[in-house]
Image (tube, coloured by chain):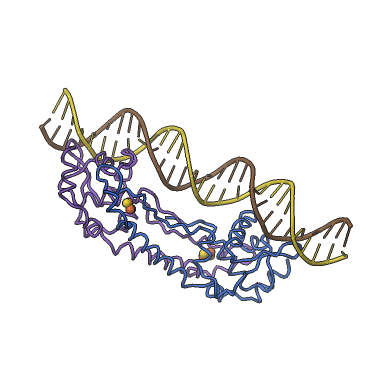
Chain colours: A blue, B purple, C yellow, D brown
Amino acid sequence: MKLSGGVEWALHCCVVLSRASAPVPSARLAELHGVSKTYLAKHLQALARAGLVRAAEGRDGGYALTREPAAITVLDVVEAIDGDQPAFRCTEIRQQGELALPPEECRVPCGIARVMAEAERSWRRSLAGTTIADLGASLDPARLDRVLGRG
Amino acid sequence: MKLSGGVEWALHCCVVLSRASAPVPSARLAELHGVSKTYLAKHLQALARAGLVRAAEGRDGGYALTREPAAITVLDVVEAIDGDQPAFRCTEIRQQGELALPPEECRVPCGIARVMAEAERSWRRSLAGTTIADLGASLDPARLDRVLGRG
DNA sequence: AAAACGTGGATAGTGTTTGTCCGAGATTAC
DNA sequence: GTAATCTCGGACAAACACTATCCACGTTTT
Ligand code: FES
Ligand code: FES
């Protein structure tokens, strides 16, 4: 069970964007955090595809959030980067091999799949309980503007 | 976020073992489920290392559970196969780049790491709420013995 | 002794993650 | 209009984890 490393980058970027007063270029975001510029650009594109950020093209462009920070949950960011596919996938082993069950007994998901799905729902529910606004509360906008301003 | 595919195999094996009246060889377990014998053997070794199953070596040997099925949770099996490392790891981005915070402000885990850790605790708690005994309730021991008996 | 069985390491093949690079297109400043 | 700045999207490669196989070896029962 592992989460893509880009998730942390994306979350930090969203926090910064939530407190920035103007669009921030992807290269600038990378410098702020000390990570690869080109790879971070990929993750930002994923955020854009998910509709969480908008890219302003052209000179003086950059990325900005599309919604209020309080309307973007941690789960939104995680799913944008890591995908929304379930961590566990039932491969219907119960229907294979010598111990196979007849198909008429397999109309509903098996017990294992149900437990896994329920656990994942708990995980998602927990992640959806925190927003970018919550995470950004401790970041001083004045300091951010100062760092961003003197490019 | 993805779980190792061997987790499903291991869970099905534990369910079978919980209702078997004698040790079951790994090759037999693989045939019962229609999966690779050699690869399943690897996963069973992982279960043995975690102390969930015991291997009876030698002729007429095989695997058996070490505890009551009701004392083995789904989480135990998942961690035995997939490892117990957290899905998210904070790489302390807050201390890197231009926006780096001074170390004296980084003594406690950052907000992002806290949210992730709490979500993972929810996931684990949910998985620990179901045992192998729960999963095996619907498996008929008589049928299992019949299939196992005529090798 | 022989047969059946698990152990642990070595070894590939495969797919995913991570990361780089570059051309095309959009937008603004001059 | 032209140049500069910036994003977009895809191609590409290296690194890594997952999946799977095989074999030599030790153990246990008959
Ligand atoms: S049949 Fe294996 S998890 Fe559903
Ligand atoms: S500093 Fe990035 S998640 Fe903790």
Position above or below: D19 against A137: above
Specify whether A114 is left or right of B111.
left
Specify whether A87 is left or right of A80.
left
Q: Position of residue A114 (x, y in %)?
A: 33, 60
Q: Position of residue D21 (x, y in %)?
A: 37, 33
Q: Quadrant location of the C terminus of chain B? A: top left
Q: Position of residue B92 (x, y in %)?
A: 53, 63
Residue at 51% over, 70% down:
A73
Specify whether A17 is left or right of B8.
right
Position above or below: B4 against C6: below
Specify whether A124 is left or right of A56.
left
Return the residue nearer the eye: A44 or B114. Answer: A44
Instruction: Name the quadrant containing residue A140.
Output: bottom right
Instruction: Name the quadrant containing residue A51.
Output: bottom right
Position above or below: D23 against A17: above
Q: Position of residue A77 (x, y in %)?
A: 53, 64
